[in-house]
Structure formats: C-alpha cells, structure tokens
Image (cartoon, rainbow, N blue to C red):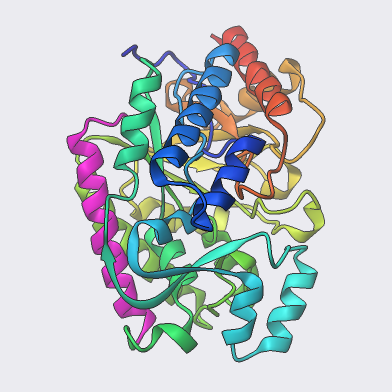
C-alpha cells in the first residue's frame, strides 16, 4: 500500500451504479436472484468503480458504495428490526400525511425511488455493516482506501418513525443508544482490519442550524428535531464522540453537506458552516469533509487542528470544472488551512441513491481527473 502524497485526491463515497447492478438489486430484493450471484455482480461493479478512480489518478480509493441502495439505507440488509420503506410507504404511517406530502413535493423527492431504513422492532446485527465492503475493496487496489458509514445521528433520525418504532423503543434516544453501540462495534472491526480511513456521514447537521430544527429534509423525513437545535446538536456530538472513541489512531472523517438528492440547487440548503464550527471543535475526528464548490457553502472556515476534505467540484452538474478553477479554489482555501492538512474531494457523492444518481460515470471520472491535474500543479 502506498503512502498518501501532499494534497491527496479522493471521493466522498458514492459512484453511479451500472445498469446491470441496478437490475441485480431489483432481482435480489424480489427474491429472483441468489445472494451469491448478486455478490458477483457487486464485485464487478466495485472493480469498475475502482478502475475509474485508478484511471483518473485518485490517491485514496472508495468502493463507490456499489453494494448499497444508498449511503444509509443499506443497513436494512444487515440488521434485524429494520425494514426498507419507500417514502411513499412511510406516508402511510406518519401522522402528518398532508405535511409530509407537501415536503416531498417541495424538495423534489421521488417518493418511490428513495428508500428509508425504518426501525420496526428490536435492532440487532445479523452481519457487519461495512467490513465486507472493505474486504472487497482491499482485493481491488493496493492504494490506501476509505470506507464510509452513516453517522449515528443521521441513522437514528432516519430509522425513528414513531408510529412503528415505539413498540421496540419508547424514544428515539433509546434507539440512538442501540445505533451508537452498533456503529462503535463496526468502527472497531474496521480498525482491527487495518482500514486507512473511516468516514462518518452526518449531512443533516446543517439542517439544524439553517432551519432551526423546524424543517425536515427527506433524509430524516420521519422525524422532526427538537425545537431547540442546541439540544439536538449536543445529542449528535455526544453520539459521535462515543462512536469515534473506537477509532484510536485511525484517520477518521466527518462528512457534512447541505443535501445531495436533486440537481435543482434551489431545493438544497444554503449557509456557511460557521454556526457549526464550535460543534465541530467538540468532535474528535481527524478530518472535516465539507462541500465548498458551490456558493451555497460560503467561505472556508478554518478547521483548527483538523484536516479539511475540501469540496472542489460539484457532483450534480454536467459541466466539468477546469483545472484552473479547482486550483483557484484550493489556493483560496490554503489561506485558511495548511496545505499538509488539505485533501481534495467532490462536494458529495456522485450516486447518493442507486436509482437517482447525480451524474453519469463518465462525467464523474472526468471531474476526478481534473482534481488530480489540479493537485499535480499545486504540488
């Protein structure tokens, strides 16, 4: 395994799934394809995603989350007590059906294309959440690798649907304790397997500071946060601290964005990361993986002693940024962050939801190649 250069290039995680994999997902879910055959299709898709990153010259490789329906829903395949529900199915259970329906319309969310892992009983692990993904990825590359996991706050908010979850957990806090335990155990497994980088995804933290806990995004459509965002942020930080304690000296990242479900930028959240700065300081993570390629993100805020995974290309646009544009974004950030603490990445994944990718694989690869060229010039 090679060491990382200065200004390493990586991805946030997801990669567009090929049509054969999408068909296999549907067939496997319907019981029309064996697990062994499905795993073979996933193996091929991961190899293709890795090869695309190799061709582009990426330094820190991900598996493109090819085995996952989306970046957090996949846990339903690994856990007892969790069932995948489309947002249309969830609409049947939530009390405020009219409000939920309006939310889906406003946010440009396809109710049948996105599935949510919903707690319907006591949550217990049938198998590791991400260790098999790491082992598959390790077989595909000799380069350093990153493995992604949903953060405990995101996962608890997504899984908690009061109307069906209260039979197993009287409160979301009690469900959160179970989620923290499961994620902490998974981080420990990955550390023991010698993973290079573990990234936790907590995109909905921005919602708390931009919407004051009142507006619900599709990523946690089943749960209204507390009216006081401070209490909700403290809960999120507390959960993250417990999970990250299992990481030891392994490099860890926290990805926080403003939504990556639509190409309509007007439906996505806007605002500086500055209100989250004091909370970021409390989280014992090596790196903050943040989006900065769109004006919606505001100016780069210094991450203190932490590394910065700097978003320099927009995964939702067909236009491929130029190397000059990326160089300019990095040079601007270097006024606030030491170059040895900066990684380059897209703002978010290229294929957050398997049936609703933000871009095609060819465009995604070209964007990665531009990032690599910019890093080469800056080095």
* Front-lying residue, 189 or 319: 189
Asked if the magenta segment contains residue 183, the reply would be yes
Quadrant including the N terminus: top left
Residue shown at 44%/23% (left/top)? 60
Q: Position of residue 47 (x, y in %)?
A: 49, 23
- The range drawn in magenta is 171-196
Using residue 166 as the reference point, say whether residue 227 is left or right of it: right
For residue 55, side relative to residue 270 (left or right)? left
Figure quadrant of residue 155? bottom left
Residue visible at 53% across and 18% down in the picture: 51
Give the residue drawn at x 71%, y 43%: 358
Viewer-nearest residue: 48 or 197: 48
**Residue 228 position in % (x across, y down):** 50, 80
The chief SS type of the magenta part is helix
Looking at the image, which is closer to me, 277 or 75? Answer: 75
Asked if residue 197 can be seen in this view, the reply is no
Q: Is residue 62 above or below residue 163?
A: above
Residue lying at 39% horizontally and 65% vertically, measured from the top left: 236
Q: Quadrant of residue 102?
A: bottom right
User: Is 273 within the magenta?
Assistant: no
Q: Could you say where residue 150 lies in the image, as x and y percent from the top left?
A: 43, 53
Asked whether the viewer can see residue 275, the reply is yes
């Amino acid at each position: 395994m090679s060491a990382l250069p200065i200004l390493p290039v990586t991805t946030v995680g997801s990669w567009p799934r090929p049509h054969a994999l999408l068909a296999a997902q549907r067939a496997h879910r319907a019981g029309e394809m064996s697990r062994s055959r499905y795993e073979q299709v996933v193996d091929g898709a991961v190899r293709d995603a890795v090869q695309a990153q190799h061709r582009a010259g990426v330094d820190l490789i991900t598996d493109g989350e090819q085995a996952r329906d989306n970046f957090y829903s996949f846990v339903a395949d690994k856990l007892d007590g969790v069932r995948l529900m489309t947002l249309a199915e969830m609409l049947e259970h939530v009390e405020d059906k009219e409000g939920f329906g309006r939310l889906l319309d406003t946010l440009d969310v396809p109710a049948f294309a996105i599935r949510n892992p919903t707690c319907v009983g006591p949550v217990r692990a049938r198998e590791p959440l991400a260790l098999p993904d790491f082992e598959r990825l390790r077989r595909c590359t000799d380069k350093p690798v990153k493995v992604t996991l949903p953060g405990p706050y995101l996962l608890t908010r997504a899984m908690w649907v009061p109307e069906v979850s209260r039979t197993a957990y009287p409160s979301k806090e009690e469900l959160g304790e179970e989620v923290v335990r499961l994620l902490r155990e998974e981080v420990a497994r990955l550390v023991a397997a010698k993973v290079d980088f573990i990234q936790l995804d907590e995109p909905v933290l921005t919602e708390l500071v931009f919407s004051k806990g009142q507006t619900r995004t599709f990523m946690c459509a089943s749960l209204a946060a507390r009216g006081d965002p401070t209490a909700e942020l403290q809960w999120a930080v507390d959960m993250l601290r417990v999970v990250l304690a299992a990481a030891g000296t392994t490099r860890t990242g926290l990805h926080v964005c403003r939504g990556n479900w639509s190409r309509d930028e007007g439906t996505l959240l806007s605002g500086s990361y500055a209100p989250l700065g004091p909370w970021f300081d409390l989280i014992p993570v090596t790196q903050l993986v943040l989006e900065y390629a769109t004006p919606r993100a505001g100016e780069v805020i210094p991450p203190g002693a932490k590394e910065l995974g700097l978003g320099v290309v927009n995964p939702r646009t067909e236009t491929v940024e130029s190397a000059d544009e990326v160089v300019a974004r990095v040079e601007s950030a270097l006024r606030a962050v030491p170059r040895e603490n900066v990684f380059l990445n897209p703002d978010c994944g290229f294929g957050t939801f398997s049936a609703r990718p933000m871009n095609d694989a060819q465009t995604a690869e070209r964007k990665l190649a531009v990032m690599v060229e910019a890093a080469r010039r800056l080095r």
